[in-house]
Amino acid sequence: MRWWGGTSSDTARDGGTGARSGTGGWTVVGPAVRDTALWLALAGVALVWFVGHPESSVALELVLPLAVLAVAIPGRRRWPVAAVFAVNALCAIGLAHPVTPANAYIVALAVSAYLLGTGPTTTRSALPAFGGCLALDLVLCAALGGGAVWWYYTLTAFPLLLLVPWLFGRYWQAQLAFVRGGWQRAQLLERQQRLVAEQARLRERTRIAADMHDSLGHELSLIALRAGALELSPTLTGRDRADLGELRAAVSEAVGHLRDTVGVLRDDEGDRAAAPTDESVEELVDRARDSGVTVDLRRDGVPAPPGLSPLVDRAVYRVVRESLTNAAKHAPGGAVRVRITHEGGRTDVRVTNAAGDAGKSLPPPGPVSGGHGLTGLRERVGVVGGTLRAAPRGTGFEVAATMPDRVGQDRPLRESGAVTDPDTESCAESGSESGSESGSESVRQLTTARRRARLRFAAAFVVPGGFGLITLGSAAYAAFQLATCVLRPADYAQLQVGRDRAEFANVLPARQFPYVSDSVKARPRPAGTTCAYYRSSGSLLDQVDVYRLCYSGSRLVSKDVVPGSGSG
């Protein structure tokens, strides 16, 4: 049960100190404050009831019960079943009341059962406890010789007060667990998403290092080759040849170090996924067309600007390749338009695909992406100082990248691990393998929690509802029986002994009182007579006087009043 934003079990785990809820952010009040407030509320109900029943015992029905509640309320955390037993015993005290079996502690019993449902007690422990409480109530009712109303109250009110609040408590506990589990799962998925994005960025940086090796290593190899050629020149002195030899050796050693460093960074999966670094965008588009993809490529400006950095060139290639791959995967059969513009020292790449044909499937034009292509593209474009935007366009999708032709030192700094354009992940990343696995696990956990909450909801509403309908039906029938066997005191006073029954039959009730106790039937009566019993009031829970009319044949022989036995 949530009191001021926390459950009783939550507070026990928090050590009774004020805290903040991890999901709702509500303040959790200490257990002593909550217990005191609960005791005061139940004591107020008991005091109001006691004032309305002056015939009740102060010690037995006020002082002793409040002392028991003062122990049972805080003790429910350690002994929840014993607390329910104690409060049930307070309700059972009402069975000894001379006027009514009901007392104010039925509210405390309902609250105790509810708290039992919100706690850690299992069904196997709770249901036998309820059975023990009901058995105690029935034994006490039999020992005190309760009337029919007392038995009816014991068989209906006590089970309802125990079962219904307990079922509501279990449903509320399942609902809270469902909400808490959803928040925890969402936080876990967010952490996993950040880790996956970071892995994609690191993998892309490794590929950038490989591209740097291929481009820079090629340039260094050319330098070493030219140094070797110059070393053979006949016009050089011995000292010049020695310097060129050292230069060529140093360049060769640098190439070897570069190859070793990139080899450590590169993994097998990245090597297999990488396309040949000497392939151009035009060759990539030709391969896509051979695979059945309709591609329109157009370059504006200088086809190959002299100042275009190899890293920018590879970034352009990666943007086109990833866009074609996503188009073939998510929009098969749709036309793709590729526009590359070199102008003003910047390169713009824009790849737009139309909506695909759902019934058509085409193989991707390049290596299949690992499901995080946009994350890798954003990292690839970002490290060269560019920006990437990917979003739906009309019925299709568009990827647009803008990069400088040269990679300078004035590139914008980006926060590590930050997602610069979160709305771009929604379309092309839906096929992520790891995301699918996380989603499947989320679906399984969500389905289990939802099923548990629904079952407890059904138990909390349907079962008590059916039980309540049966109880209300039987109560209505019993009330009808008691209400139709009432002989008004004024009519009873007008009845005269010796008169024939037909003379006053019009004032007699439609039926006799059906729940006459054996002790009333055993009272002395005139010999040879038959007696009829009627209640003096229509009160259902209070004891009322019973009128006994004894007949000899159809003549009224005697009439008398049996005090306080009209409830059974």
Image (spheres, grey):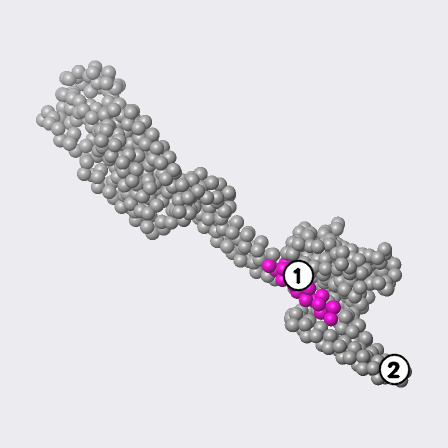
Give the amino acid at mark 2. Leu
Can residue 336 be seen in this snapshot? no
Q: Secondary structure at mark 1?
A: helix
Q: Which mark is residue 201?
A: 1
Residue kind at label 1, given as amino acid type:
Arg
Crowd class of label 1 (few under 14; some 14 to 19; many from 20; radius 10 Å):
many
Residue located farthest toward the left when viewing the structure as drawn:
527
> Residue 388 in the image: x percent, y percent?
73, 55
Q: Which mark is residue 236?
A: 2
Residue drawn 21% across the image and 41% down it: 139
Instruction: Provide residue 472's location: percent of width, then percent of height.
Output: 35, 35
**Circles 1 and 2 in contact, beta carbons < 8 Å:** no
Residue at 81 percent across and 75 percent down: it is: 223
Image quarter in which the N terminus is found: top left
Name which quarter of the figure residue 335 lies in.
Answer: bottom right
Return the x and y of residue 232 as percentages of the image width and height.
85, 84
Prevailing secondary structure class for the magenta stretch in the rendered image = helix
The quadrant in which the C terminus is found is top left
> Which residue is depicted at the point 46% across and 48% down?
177
For residue 373, which numbered disc appears in the image? none
Q: Look at the picture and state if 78 lies above or below 347.
A: above
Comes first in the chain, label 1 or label 2: 1
Is residue 22 visible in the rendered image? The answer is yes
> Viewed as shown, does residue 257 lie left or right of 505?
right
Instruction: Please tell me whether residue 295 belongs to the stretch shown in magenta.
Output: no
Q: Which quarter of the picture shows residue 406?
A: bottom right
Magenta span covers which residues? Answer: 195-213
Task: Please report the residue visible at 44 percent of the width from the left and 47 percent of the height from the top.
Answer: 174
